[in-house]
């Protein structure tokens, strides 16, 4: 039997070089607690590229021919853990407070569009959860506001004149493909109750697929949150469990960009273990029944 090749020794200086490159590329910061993860992924990439020196690998990454490999490395370094209906208290706040507010105030401005961005969407459970909650909120809105005898049958998911756009973005192409595929196995469906399964999923074999009407609300696209050119004019941004991998300087820059990407008085949701405390004073915190959101403060209300 041939013994596996011993792992290459990576020096502290080499790790620092790669750590800086990754940070510059995507904002992910590998401090001492996470360097072993970076080291492990580097070993894998070196093996796959059949290279035996970190320095040669680094030279490849910074060259024009190395762009695809740099994307591949970044992709391997992402953590894609997610689930449907993650952080129920926060989603209740979104459903009962934020959507209520938008559906109440927008018609007064003759606006009938909702634009929501799931930034760092992973395999799609977050944007599809948002889609299902928006559909529920609109159905209830219609029930209350349609003149007697004017309820459309069959009920459209998005009753006119409303328009809904949910943008789902990530830096990893493989998770974007999974999101577009919109098919989930039983273990990924654990947090979806039967009521939602019945209304918003089709079952084929042992898999569940998101129904076309909900799927059509969500548009998947590549966006690197490190860059300046990010989707504008959002009513709500969800960026949950992403900033946790960035350092404070990068978090501050990102929150500043989110401020600009939101409409006036727009809302921002961050992860359970994340907060805007110490990062900005341009948002006010809304806290209801253990759910937290942030709303843009306007200089000229
Ligand atoms: C832990 S998942 C969170 C998924 C979902 N938001 C949730 O809370 O369930 C983090 C996602 O952020 C993405 N990500 C990390 N850095 C990014 C960046 N610079 N730009 C865009 N997406 C990024 C990762 O690829 C990953 O899919």
Image (tube, rainbow, N blue to C red):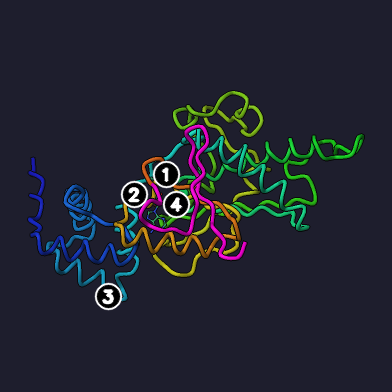
- What quarter of the picture does the C terminus occupy? bottom right
Bin the neighbour count of mark 2 within 10 Å (Cα to Cα): few under 14, some 14-19, many 20 and up. Answer: some
Report the magenta residues as a range.
275-301
Give the CA distance from mark 3 to mark 1.
35 Å
Residue 215 shown left or right of residue 152 in the figure: left
- Tell which circle, 2 or 1, labels the residue nearer the N-terminal end: 2
Bin the neighbour count of mark 3 within 10 Å (Cα to Cα): few under 14, some 14-19, many 20 and up. Answer: few
- Tell which circle, 2 or 4, labels the residue nearer the N-terminal end: 4
Task: Mark 1 and ligand 1: say if the CB distance to the nearest ligand atom is below 8 Å.
Answer: yes
Which-is-in-front pick, marks 1 and 4? Answer: 1
Q: Mark 4 highlights which residue? A: 120
Q: Where is residue 25 in the image (x, y as percent from the top left)?
A: 32, 66
Q: Position of residue 252 (x, y in %)?
A: 37, 61
Dot 2: element: helix
Dot 1: element: loop
Q: Mark 3 highlights which residue? A: 63
Residue 112 shown left or right of residue 232 in the figure: right
Tag shown at residue 271: 1
59, above or below 174, in the image: below
Tag shown at residue 244: 2
């Amino acid at each position: 039997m041939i013994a596996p090749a011993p792992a290459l020794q990576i020096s502290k200086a080499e790790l620092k070089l790669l750590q800086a490159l990754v940070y510059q590329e995507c904002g992910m910061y590998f401090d001492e607690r996470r360097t072993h993860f970076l080291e492990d992924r580097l070993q894998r990439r070196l093996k796959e590229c059949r290279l035996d020196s970190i320095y040669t690998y680094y030279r490849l990454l910074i060259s024009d021919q190395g762009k695809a490999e740099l994307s591949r490395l970044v992709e391997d370094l992402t953590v894609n853990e997610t689930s449907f209906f993650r952080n129920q208290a926060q989603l209740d706040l979104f459903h009962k407070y934020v959507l209520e507010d938008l559906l109440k105030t927008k018609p007064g401005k003759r606006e009938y569009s909702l634009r929501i961005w799931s930034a760092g969407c992973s395999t799609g459970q977050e944007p599809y959860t948002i889609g299902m909650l928006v559909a529920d909120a609109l159905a209830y809105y219609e029930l209350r506001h349609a003149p007697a005898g004017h309820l459309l049958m069959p009920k459209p998911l998005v009753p006119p004149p409303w328009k809904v756009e949910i943008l789902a973005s990530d830096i990893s192409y493989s998770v974007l493909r999974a999101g577009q595929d919109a098919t989930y196995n039983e273990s990924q469906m654990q947090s979806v109750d039967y009521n939602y399964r019945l209304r918003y999923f089709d079952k084929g074999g042992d898999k569940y697929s998101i129904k076309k009407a909900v799927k059509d609300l969500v548009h998947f696209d590549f966006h690197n949150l490190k860059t300046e050119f990010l989707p504008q004019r959002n009513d709500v941004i969800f960026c949950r469990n992403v900033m946790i991998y960035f350092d404070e300087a990068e978090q501050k820059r990102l929150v500043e960009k989110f401020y600009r990407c939101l409409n006036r008085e727009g809302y921002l949701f961050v992860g359970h273990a994340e907060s805007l405390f110490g990062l900005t004073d341009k948002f006010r915190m809304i806290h209801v029944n253990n759910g937290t959101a942030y709303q843009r403060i306007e200089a000229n209300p």
